[in-house]
Image (cartoon, helix red, strand yellow):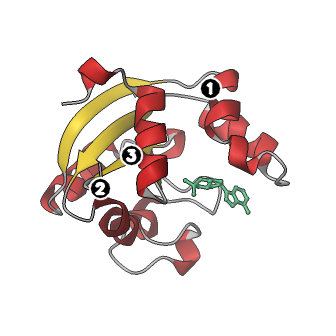
Amino acid sequence: AENRTFTMIKPDAVESGHIGAILEQISASGFKIVAMKLTQMTQHDAETFYAVHKERPFFGELVEFMTRGPIVAAILEKENAVEDFRTLIGATNPTDAADGTIRKKYAKNVGENAVHGSDSNENAKIEGDFHFAGREQF
Ligand code: CMP
């Protein structure tokens, strides 16, 4: 749907105790949570989810990072969700992220960057369906 996006609070932000603050900022910004769970990706999960990046030099590091501990996976609903959520999280590299964005506040570096946000409506649907069965999407 054009009004939904998919997010993960990544292992770095979960380890650092930022789940509550990040969910608070997401809610305060007008996003409704329509699916959510604490889960841990297996190596196979991460290699599949990030298959588009498999030729990148950082692929191994990315898979290792994303599997090292629990994440919060969620589907969010809001008008213009994909674009508005990417504005809320800020640039991939926190040094480039605008003040007040989630990555500016909580990301450690370009790899350990606290949160994921889908980059298109098509990928939002694919990524949400990767993590949630239909009956888990409200
Ligand atoms: P995200 O945009 O959510 O999905 C792809 C991820 O790859 C990105 O977040 C970062 O976590 C990671 N990534 C992107 N660029 C680099 C990089 N140069 N070095 C390490 N990890 C990266």
Q: Which residue is mark 2?
A: 2
Left or right: 59 with respect to 126?
right
Q: Does residue 99 lie above or below 78 as drawn?
A: below
Q: Is mark 1 within 8 Å of ligand 1?
A: no
Q: Which residue is mark 3?
A: 6
The answer to the question of whether label 3 and label 1 lie on touching residues, with beta carbons closer than 8 A, is no
Q: Of marks 1 and 2, which one's residue comes earlier in the chain?
A: 2
> Which quadrant of the frame does ligand 1 lie within?
bottom right
Cα–Cα gap, marks 2 and 3: 12 Å
Left or right: 96 with respect to 50?
left
Q: Does residue 24 lie above or below 100 as drawn?
A: above
x%, y% of residue 138? 18, 31
Left or right: 76 with respect to 101?
left
x%, y% of residue 85? 33, 62
x%, y% of residue 70? 48, 28
Cα–Cα gap, marks 1 and 2: 25 Å
Q: Which residue is mark 1?
A: 45
Return the mark for residue 79: none
Kind of residue indicated by mark 3: Phe
Q: Nearer the viewer, residue 43 or 77?
A: 77
x%, y% of residue 107? 50, 59
| Nearer the camera: disc 1 or disc 2 | 2
Which quarter of the figure has residue 39? Answer: top left
Q: Residues within 10 Å of mark 3 (few under 14, many from 20)?
A: many
